[in-house]
Image: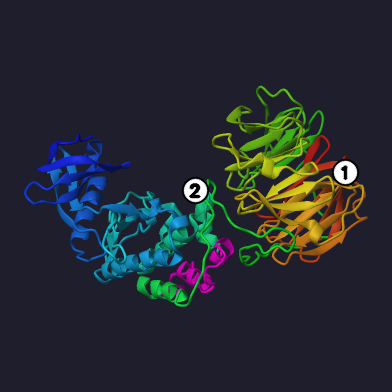
Amino acid sequence: MLRNGQVFAGYTVEGLLGRGGMGSVYLARHPRLPRRIALKLLNQELFADSEIRARFEREADLAAQLDHANIVTVFDRGIEDEQLWISMQYIDGVDGDSIDVRALEPAQAVRIIAETARALDFAHRRGVLHRDVKPANILVERSDDPGPARVLLTDFGIARLLNDTGRLTRTGTFVATLAYASPELLSGANIGHQTDQYSLACSLFRLLTGTGPFDATNPVALIQGHMQSPPPLLSAIRPGLPHELDAILVRAMAKRVEDRYGSCGEFADAAVAAFAGPVSVPAPPPAPSPPTVVLPTPPGPQLWFPTPAPARALPAVPNRLAMTGKSGLGFGVCVRAIAFDPGGRVLTSIDSVDKVRRWDLTTDATTTKSLAGSHDPIAVAAFFPDGRQLVTGGGGTAQVWDSTTGRPADAAFVGHNRWVWAVACSRDGGRVATASADQTVRIWAVATGAQIGDAAALRTSQAAGALAFSPDGRYLACGSSADEVRLLDTHTCRIVWSSRSTDAVPANSAVVSVAFSPDGRVVAAGSSDGSLRFWDLPRGRLIGSAAGEHHKTIHSLAFRADGTLLATGSADKTVRFWDPTTGKEIGQALTALSPIWSVAFSPDGGSLAVAAGKSVQVWK
């Protein structure tokens, strides 16, 4: 690290501007001219890495070819004491990632993007792709002069020429920023100038809302968002924005390159035109972590849900299902939860006396582990999506465990003062929800064990006995002892919908199980009286209900991967199948020898695992 006043390559260091994983940037004085420059140094220990060195030198060479008012100018580059350096234009200002979006007028955000679009189109006309467009690489200059501040694009560290077929990154190495990366960049497909346009559109989303379009802490969930999900509607997140912006961003962030605008400038012009008339937009709410999203209060939901992907063709429920293999995973008390691994080859179960068993369905081999250090009887349990971790609840705490070793993870969730009745895991594995007899629902960060949000805001008038995260993690469905389902916005910790707005409350019943359809548009609830209900959330209406088919508590619900089938497991020892679009029963029920506590479809939808009493069976 250089000291203030130290001379390096002729430049006198005045201070550190920033540091990253590959190097540092210093403010320095030019040796001969009365000018301050930004001096970028590659970390000395990386000098021997030929790929990183080539990328660093390439940044200077490409950026030096781009003489434009909206691109940071590169003056010189060289090597000093086995350290590569670049001297470039110093911009006294802030980067887009540091801007407080609450104080940024939407029209100003669009102007910043429009200026950046000019820089990108200029680079594209000269055959240069930036490939890492994001707010942190967009600089806004401070100025006392009247008029708009200058906007400049910087950091061409992973840029490449359009006609360049060579590679400056190792096979399998990804160096762009995931939050703003296009589908084709993530998949390794051919890229073009529309790749930068996609990232620029993500940057506009960030400047208008304070968060990226696919906000997730888990890289896999982030990639899935870019590859598969449409962008959230801006007008639903920040009311008052021109509705035209929704369609503009959908086009600029289209999954197919050919569906986007012809240039970054064309996209920016469309965004500017959306503000041509008088628009009054309230500032977005403060952005804690996770960021706040404004949604209406019940009744009458006005929630955003993604457009469902085309359903995969899976077989309908036959009149009679055949059990394959043998019953496995015998237990001393009863099985509480089951889960397939993502490949559908391993089935993992947890029982009420802390035994975890993994069943390899291809070899029929099983392994058993006891949860190390578990003292309270396990009342509830839920597996993470990969099946390798689970969360259990019993006394006043919940604990995450490694199901392969039986050892506790670092995350223990302490805060309830009475029995934990329900647990749920978000699909990205980053959060856990718990509900307790103390009439609170709490959401926890798995990485830190810290509570997210205010417990007082999650206090309920009746104890919640069932929880489920929506597929995108945005909502938490809470089933209560008053046979009510409520939808909690996990960003704002506000109730945004209640089933009481669509149906009467049955007497002497409680919601015991809840589940979202794979596209998040339908929520189903099973009750202690054996009744089942389905709601269409975007329309805020009851699809259908069933009472009498199950005559005892519905302990578990599971949607098939394509969303066309729901399985319900009941204490009446039957599994039944339902059409979520109509709420009607289809096919023939399965009958077990013991009450059923858990059901789970395999990832391909071809098998169903059923936990009944002391055993687990797999059916096809």
Residue 564: percent from left, percent from top: 73, 62
Q: Residue at x 90, y 53 (%)?
A: 506
Q: Residue at x 23, y 45 (%)?
A: 50
Q: In front: mark 2 or mark 1?
A: 2
Judge from the rendering whether residue 605 lies leftward or rightward of residue 131; answer left or right: right
Residues 313 and 375: in front is 375
Q: Earlier in the sequence, mark 2 or mark 1?
A: 2
The color scheme shown is rainbow
Please give the range of residues in magenta. Answer: 232-261
Say if residue 458 shows up in the picture.
yes
The residue singled out by tag 1 in the image is: 571
Residue 412: percent from left, percent from top: 62, 30
Mark 2: few/some/many CA within 10 Å (<14, 14-19, 20+) = few
Say if residue 187 shows up in the picture.
no
* Vertical position of residue 127 compared to residue 372: above or below: below
Q: Amino acid at mark 1?
A: Ala
